[in-house]
Amino acid sequence: MSAIINPLANPKGANKLCELCEKPAYIQCTKCYVTFYCDAEHQRADWVSIHSKVCQLLIPVRTAVPYYTLQADREHHRAQILQRQEQLMLIARTAAQKRLFEGSHRESLPASLLSLRCAMDIYGSSAVHLVPPYLLLAEANIGLGCLSAAEQYLSWADWTVLKTPGCSWMVRHQLHRCLGRLFVAKGNLEEALFHLANDVYYASEEYGLDNIVTCGGYYLMADVFIKQGKMDIVNTLYIQLANTWHSHLCRLFESYTQGSIEPEEYLDEAQQVEADRMLRSMLDAPEGVPERQPEQAAVLTHALALLWLLGGDREKALEFGTKALSSCQLVPDRSLTEPIQRLLQLAQAEDNPSDADES
């Protein structure tokens, strides 16, 4: 992080509030000049979490609105600002989710706060659109062990859902997933399973039963069953999860090879991290779960190879693709052999473009 600390010209100005804690601010970002902090620690935390990504995007949103004589010009300006706020909200939400999947709960907080602030600016203080950032903040606090703060955010989210007629399945599944995480942290596993079952129900209504979004609920349920020592159920869930992710990534790979869509359009950063964490943890079976059979190992390593090829990391794609081919050779069913070989050839060709040109 570059040195961007600069005392305000008028440190007594009470109208400047810290980006993270809303206390009086005495430090200004010298790159955008529209973001303020109470101390250097909060400035560094914000920079690492989200500000480095949105610094320049904040300038038009937080700069005083110029005077326009024509109504059409005023409406055009408002539309531009709204579009910029929506862009900021999406960037902040994705960054926060990525940090959470990485286990970086503290680093996710500033991005989550910015997502909430943008949602309030766009939709007001009581709209259902505030629920996703509330849940991000709740999950971050669960990870930090601040359960009272997490419960407060979840109570706001729950109340918002309850008073929103026709609230979508998507929002409901997100709420129950976070409630499941809270009760796992509190040690109430039965209550956690209740909410995670609701999570799976609502997610399947929104996305379908065999969908990667629904998989997240099954994965969390598997963690609860591990704590309960029900390893046979865990193994069944892991097989279903592996097959769902593998089928999804195979479909993406086929579209990628046909050149219909660029790989970055398939999975955002948060989804990439989530998939990698989930697939790796299933590959490295927890203690008590039956060791991965060669066919299961082939599916999981092939899925990881596909994930990283689509993510642009040829080295990891080759690493997992090689492991997948080795596992595949240990099972009678060789149906995966050709797709794995094709992946390895593509990864090698794109890793060495000069060789591909010569051929």
Image (cartoon, rainbow, N blue to C red):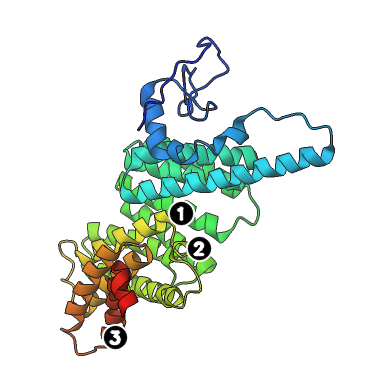
What residue type is disc 2 on? Tyr
Residue ID for mark 2 = 202
Mark pair 1, 3: CA separation: 41 Å
N-term mark: 3 or 2: 2
Q: Choose top left, top right, bottom left or bottom right for residue 240.
A: bottom left
As rendered, which of 245 and 356 lies closer to the eye? Answer: 356
- Total label count? 3
Q: Residues within 10 Å of mark 3 (few under 14, many from 20)?
A: few
Q: Are marks 2 and 1 in contact (CB under 8 Å)?
A: yes
Q: Residue at x 54, y 44 (%)?
A: 89
Residue ID for mark 3 = 338
Q: Are marks 1 and 3 in contact (CB under 8 Å)?
A: no
What residue type is disc 1 on? His
Dot 2: element: helix
As rendered, which of 228 and 272 lies closer to the eye? Answer: 272
Disc number placed over residue 176 in the picture, else none:
1
N-term mark: 2 or 1: 1
Residue 197 place in picture, x, y as percent:
42, 62
